[in-house]
Image (cartoon, rainbow, N blue to C red):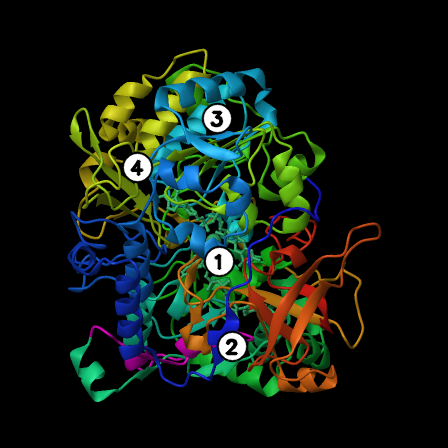
Amino acid sequence: MSLTDEPRPQPVDETKVEIKPYTAPAGGWGSVRSLIKSFRREHNPVSGSSVLLKQNKPQGFACVSCAWAKPADPHVFEFCENGAKATTWEITPKRVTPAFFAAHPVRELLTWRDHDLEEAGRLTEPMRWDSGTDKYVPVSWDQAFREIGAELRQLKPEEIVFYSSGRASLEASYMYALFARMLGTNNLPDSSNMCHESTSVALPKTIGVPVGTVTLDDFKKTDCIIFFGQNVATSSPRMLHDLQEASRRGVPIITFNPLRERGLERFTNPQSPVEMLTGSSTRISSQYLQVMPGGDIAAICGVCKALIDSGQVDHEFITEHTSGFDALAESLRNISWPQIERESGLRRSELETVAATYAAAKSCIGIYGMGLTQHRNGVENVQMIVNLLLLRGNIGKEGAGICPVRGHSNVQGQRTVGITEKPDLVPNDKLREIYGFEPPMKKGLNTVEACEGILAGTVKAFVSLGGNFVRAIPDHDRMEPAWRRQRLTVQILTKLNRTALVHGEVSYILPCLGRIEIDRQATGKQAVSMEDSTACIHGSWGQVEPASPHLLSEIRIVAELAKATLTNPIVNWDRWASSYALIRDAIERTYPKRFKDFNKRLFQPGGFHRPLAARERKWNTKTGKANFTVPDSLITDPDVDVRGPDVLRLFTLRSNGQFNTTIYSYDDRFRGIHGTRRVILMHRNDIERLGLSEGNIVTAICAASRPGEAPRQVAGLRVVPYELPEGSCAGYYPECNPLLPLWHHAKESKVPAAKSIPVRLIRT
Ligand SMILES: Nc1nc2c(c(=O)[nH]1)N[C@H]1C(S)=C(S)[C@@H](COP(=O)(O)OP(=O)(O)OC[C@H]3O[C@@H](n4cnc5c(=O)[nH]c(N)nc54)[C@H](O)[C@@H]3O)O[C@H]1N2
Ligand SMILES: Nc1nc2c(c(=O)[nH]1)N[C@H]1C(S)=C(S)[C@@H](COP(=O)(O)OP(=O)(O)OC[C@H]3O[C@@H](n4cnc5c(=O)[nH]c(N)nc54)[C@H](O)[C@@H]3O)O[C@H]1N2
Ligand SMILES: [Mo]
């Protein structure tokens, strides 16, 4: 199908658009009102609220929203506005049944918006696309597995991709990765390839572990927090409790973010009756630096330079524990303050203030999110934070450490149990020893490479364990037509989304249980487990009746796919799918240190932490030390040659009314944007300079396209003045993804550079 006749979602009715500055703190009554609205919308007032009491509790279920840590001594309501929205969204009484698909051909559904597709409700039965009627029609589970198995067996293993979004449990993910490897491929890309892969590349090289080193306890003891590019009130709101406690102790919280995010300024705890009644709030950031997007390396260089110049580094730690300090110090001497100021967009005095606050603190935590990882130099960004922390010995001591805030609730855990395209991260010897097969040693495809394979026609089948791949990736207008040329697409989902509609020649939707639902197997009710952002592993029990009697668990679906596809039945997949404790035993055998006494420790209050050498100041790096890194360049996109006064640097954002491609509503409360997502946030001076006015409708065009490439553009964006640096602008993900070229990604990690897209705006 050509680009021009691809059905597109209809724009939302914009008669109710309202844009007004939000001045209240995050949380508070606004958060309660927003929750009540979402309960009403899903018609789920009673069961919703009783289920919420079980959220993030021992013997309860782990929230399906973000990956923030769950305390051992939970609050009465251990959930936030967005966690509660995610719960009501999953346990909605609405259903997408075979009758729904009979009434709506796929071509029609392609005109539905992301929000409307998911809002239609939970999928209830397995479906197969019928080319004659262009509808999804019911298929029995047996037949679906048989046919998918037959299709997969026809293909070479390297032609098949097994994607996972980061929600599936440790048990399901372990089985899924094992299945792919037994078939003969490491093609196991996951959502973290678009997210924290820059972390997974940077941290092992510098501190010898692939994940963050802080625990919740460190938040209680820290003296200083530095926060880069993470929107806590929307993306991990439960962390606001930890920040609020720190702020009350007088701990400085220094924020680097181009946008003034209200949730990073003040917070009223909706679970505190006193704060709610008195309308009081706590400050979050003590210093807010509106860095230019992509300017963090320059900014951190400035802070490091100031520290070194004033002799405020921890020489003892540096000598004993690190390597590469002299090279870093030398390179910082050669970087001038005017260069730093130009690239960061910040003043020398502001960065010197940061250095002074940091130097006065005995311990410091460095927190970061997508604002750092989703850049061409995303890996160097993370390495710069490590530099900053190492200068004062802030790794491997109480109250200190590095804290990448992960996205999906089990994205970190999936990597821990084998979801990776990199064979050197897999315990291949153990797999040989336990299962007696030869694991594939060829590197598999990550997300960007899988897309390249789809464009080139070398990827012929795509199996998704959750997620909404075609909406999450860059370059929608090139990827959607290519996606259709695949032979087979299989989506294991809870809700309908566009990825299932832009199907291959043969296509299946396999509906699964959500984590909040009771999972009954032959040996009784089953628990599953996940790992949070602090490398803490928890169990989770489903609480509500399944959305449909026809749903299977993800584990059962993976088991059946493996049975139908693999010709060599080494594993007794049925036994595993009947008793998940046996899968946990297998995980423990494969990773004996990480998962010691897995079944026994699963439900201890607060979960259990996997061991991390860097927490003990043991450095599993090539040098045996923690490594400083010299940044290659202060410039964000050194190899993307676009200049000109009319080029703006676009960074894509999440709203408070979405979880990734799941759009709960068209309201972004903290940013004061209501009734639309088709906006472009701009500095007032840029609006004027470019001859535009507030409320104009513009088309954004990617300014970095290569010769011969079709123009990348998104039309119908409303100009909204906002507090962000001149020369930058912001818009929502996934609406802006057609502007992001597939090749515009972090150099080593290949995370799409969604926070720095050069664009021009044309008035329409
Ligand atoms: N409610 C909700 N929660 C979520 C999600 C969701 O969509 N909705 N998604 C989940 C997932 S998968 C993830 S990965 C996380 C994402 O959570 P975040 O890491 O918070 O991701 P974003 O919202 O994309 O943007 C992060 C922030 O980076 C800032 N920023 C942009 N560019 C730069 C820059 O160059 N430098 C600096 N310093 N800052 C910059 C933006 O202004 C924004 O405040 O949240 C998870 N939790
Ligand atoms: N421009 C731009 N692009 C981005 C980003 C950005 O900041 N800017 N962020 C990137 C990031 S950080 C990420 S993580 C990706 C997200 O990419 P994905 O993880 O692929 O996308 P999601 O939107 O989280 O997936 C939502 C779908 O998951 C399914 N689902 C929900 N719960 C379950 C479940 O329990 N089991 C199963 N099997 N399915 C379930 C539902 O059917 C739902 O439609 O997007 C990336 N893309
Ligand atoms: Mo993510």
Q: Earlier in the sequence, mark 4 or mark 3?
A: 3
Horizontal side, residue 634 vs residue 609: left or right:
right
Q: Nearer the viewer, mark 2 or mark 3?
A: 3
Label 2 is placed on what type of residue? Gln
* Disc 1 secondary structure class: helix
Q: CA distance from mark 2 to mark 1?
A: 17 Å
Give the quadrant of residue 666.
Answer: bottom left
Residue 414 placement, left or right of 577: right
> Reading the chain from its start, which is encountered first: label 1 or label 4?
1
**Would residue 382 be seen by someone viewing this image from the given angle?**
no
Q: CA distance from mark 1 to mark 4?
A: 31 Å
Residue 429 against residue 325 in the figure, above or below: above
Camera-nearest residue between 616 and 719: 719
Q: Amino acid at mark 1?
A: Glu
Residue 44 in the image: above or below residue 348: above
Q: Is residue 91 magenta?
A: no
Q: Where's residue 44, x and y in %?
A: 23, 57
Residue that appears at 23% across and 30% down: 581
The residue at label 2 has a CB less than 8 Å from ligand 1: no
Can you tell which of label 2 and label 4 is closer to the viewer? 4
Q: Which mark is residue 180?
A: 3
How far across and how far down the image is residue 313, in percent?
A: 51, 72
Residue at the limit of the structure toward the right, as seen here: 707
**Of callouts 2 and 3, the N-terminal one:** 3
- Residue assigned mark 1: 320
For disc 1, the neighbor class at 10 Å (few under 14, some 14 to 19, many from 20) is: few
